[in-house]
Amino acid sequence: MTSGGTSITAIGVFVAFVVVSLLITWWSARRTRSVGEFYTAGSSITGFQNGLALAGDFMSAATFLGITGLVFIGGADGMLFTSAIAVSWAFILFAFADRMRNLGKYTFADVVAYRLNQSQLRVLAAAGALTVAIPYLIAQMVGAGALIETLFGIPYLAAVLVVGVLMTVYVVFGGMLATTWVQVTKAVLLLVGGTALVMLVLAQFGYDLNALFDRAASEHPRGAAILRPTGLYDDPISVISLALAFICGTAGLPHVLMRFFTVPDARQARRSIGYAVLFIGYFQAAILLVGFGAISLLAGQTEYVDASGRISGGANMVAIYLSRVIGGEIFFGLIAAVAFATILAVVAGILLSASAAISHDLYNRVIKRGALSSDDEVRVSRIATIAIAATAIGLSILFKDVNVGVLSTLALAVAASVNFPAIFLSLYWKDLTTKGAIAGGATGLVSVVVLIVLGPTIWVNVLGNETAVFPYAYPTLFSVGAAFVVTIVVSLADRSSAAAAEREAYPAQLLKSETGRDV
Amino acid sequence: MRSRWRWSLSTILIGAYLGYGVGGVYFPDAYARPFMGTSLPSGLAFGYSIIFVSIILSAVYVRVANRLEAESVLETLTDD
C-alpha cells in the first residue's frame, strides 16, 4: 500500500477469521476419525451448506478481485466471463450432480474408474487432478502473497508461509469437515462484503443505475467504447473456446467434484449445486457493477491510478482501492481481510483434493490395490497433505514472479481437456473403454500444454515473441475436441475382451448412477 | 424422463450463452445501444438475463428431478 500502511481493521478482522477457522478445525478434528470423515465429512453436509461451500470453493480471489480488475480495464467485455461462470455451474447441475453422487465415494476417479480398469484410470484421473490442483494452488498462493504484501505490509515470504501453514492445519487436523465450514464462513463473508460494496457504489449514484453507467462512460479513458464488446469478441472461435474453457473446465476441477460426495444423496447433491448457482450468479452479477463503479469512482484518484490508467499494484487491487474510496478505512480493512480469508479457504479445498488423489487413488487404490485400512489411509493422506503443501510453498517462493493468470488459465484448460472428457464419456457413453479413455486423456493433456505454450499467453506475453504460433489464448475448443475424438475413435476400435466386458457393465452403472442403488 | 430435462435445459442455456457471445462478434453496435431507454448497454442486459435464466433453470431442474426421484422411490416401495 502506497499510503496509510497497515490497516488495524484489516488485521483485526483477519485475526478474527483465523481464530474462528482454527476453532472450526479443533471442533472438526474430534469428529474426523475414519477415512470417509476425512475425505468427505462422512457425507453429513446438507445441500444448503454444501451450496455455500461450493460457492466458497469457486469464488476465489481471482473471481472477486480479478473480474473487478477485468471490468475496470475492459468494461462490458467482463460480462463474457461473468455469464459463462453462471452457465457453467448450471451445466454441472444438469449433467453431473446426481450421477456423480450416485457413483462416487471420495474422488472423481471413483466415477471414471467405475466400470473400467481401476489402476489405469486411477493413474489417469490422479494425474489430471494433480496437474490441475498444483498450478491452481501455486497461482492462488502467489496471488495471496502479493496481495498480502501490498495490503498488510507483511513480506512476501512470510505471507506465503502464513497461508501455507494455515491451509495445512485445516486439512491435516480437520479434513473435509473443517475445510467445508471454513469455506462456508468465507462464502458468507464474501457474499456480505460484496453486497455491501455494491450497495455503497450504488449509494454514490443515488441508487440510479443509469447514472452509474453514464458516469463510467464519461470517466473511462476509452469513453463510451467500454460499453461495447471489444477485444474478447475478436472472432467466434475465441468466444466458443472461452465458453468451453469455463463450462468444461469448471466441471473438471477436482476440488469442486469432490464436494458432490460430502452430501448424503443425489437429491442433496442437486440442491447443493442449485444453491451454488444462485450464490455464484448473484455474486458475479454484483461484482460486474463493482467493476463499473471502480471505473466511475477511481478515475482521477491519482493516488491509485496514474494518468494513463495504470493501477498501482496491478488491476487486481481495484476492488480494494474502491472500498477505501467509498467506505473509508474501516470498510477497506473489512474488504482486505475478506480477500485474504477468501484465498485461505480456497487453497484448503484444493489441497485436500490433491492429497486425496495421492493417498486414495494412487497409494491405496493403485499401489496397495485397495488393501489399506481406514486408519492407515487417513495417516497417508495427512502425510500427502503436508508434502503437497510444502511443495506448493516452496514453488510459490521460487516462482514469486510467475504470471498468476497463466497458471489459472492452464489449470482450467487442463481440467477441461483431461478430466472433463473422461468423466463425461464414462457417465454417458456406453462404448467407452479403458484404452480409449487413456488415449484421449493423454491427447488432451499434451495438446492443451502445447497449444498454451505456442499461444499468446506464453509465446508472446512470457517468451516475448512477436506473434503467437497458435492464435487463441484459450485452446480448449481444439484440445477438448481432440480429446473427445481420440477417446471415441480408440474406444470404437478396441475389440479386446476387456473392452467387451466394460461395455457390458454400462447398464448396471447406468442404473446405479440414476437411482443410487445396486442391481 | 430426467434425461430429457437434463439435455433440454443444458441445450437452452449453452445455446443462449453462445448466441450472446458470438452475437457480440457480429453486432457490437447493437450490444452498445442503450437497453430500453436506460443507460445499461443491451449487451450487458443480455448477459444479465443469462445469469438470471441460469439461476431459474437450475431451480426448475432441482425441483423437477428431486420430485421425480421421490415418485420413483415411492413406486418401488409400493411394488415391493
Image (cartoon, coloured by chain):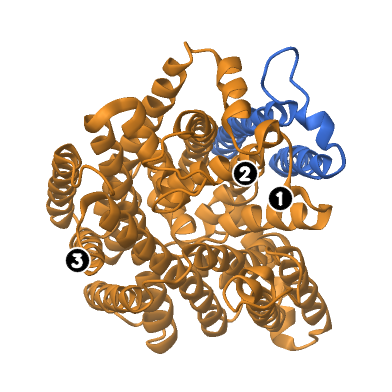
Q: Identify the amino acid type marked 3.
A: Ala
Q: Which chain is orange?
A: A
Question: Would residue A251 be visible to someone looking at this image?
Answer: no
Q: Nearer the viewer, residue A9 or A215?
A: A215
Q: Identify the amino acid type marked 1.
A: Leu
Please report contact status of discs 3 and 2: CB closer than 8 Å, yes or no: no
Q: Residues within 10 Å of mark 1 (few under 14, many from 20)?
A: some
Chain on which label 2 sits: A
Q: CA distance from mark 1 to mark 3?
A: 37 Å
Chain on which label 3 sits: A
Label disc, if present, on residue B28 of the rendered structure:
none
- N-terminal label among 1 and 3: 3
Q: Identify the amino acid type marked 2.
A: Gly
Please report contact status of discs 2 and 1: CB closer than 8 Å, yes or no: yes
Image spot of residue B66 (x, y percent): 56, 34
- N-terminal label among 2 and 1: 2
Residues at marks 1 and 3 on the same chain: yes
Decide: is A386 above or below A404.
below
Q: Residue at x 57, y 74 (%)?
A: A462
The quarter of the rendered structure image containing the C terminus of chain A is bottom right
Chain on which label 1 sits: A
Colour of chain B in the rendered structure image: blue
Comparing labels 3 and 2, the label whose residue is closer to the camera = 2
Q: Residues within 10 Å of mark 2 (few under 14, many from 20)?
A: many
Q: CA distance from mark 2 to mark 1?
A: 9 Å
Q: Quickly name the residue at label 3.
A: A158
Image spot of residue A28 (x, y percent): 18, 52
Q: Quickly name the residue at label 1.
A: A232
Q: Residue at x 14, y 46 (%)?
A: A15
Quarter location, residue B24: top right
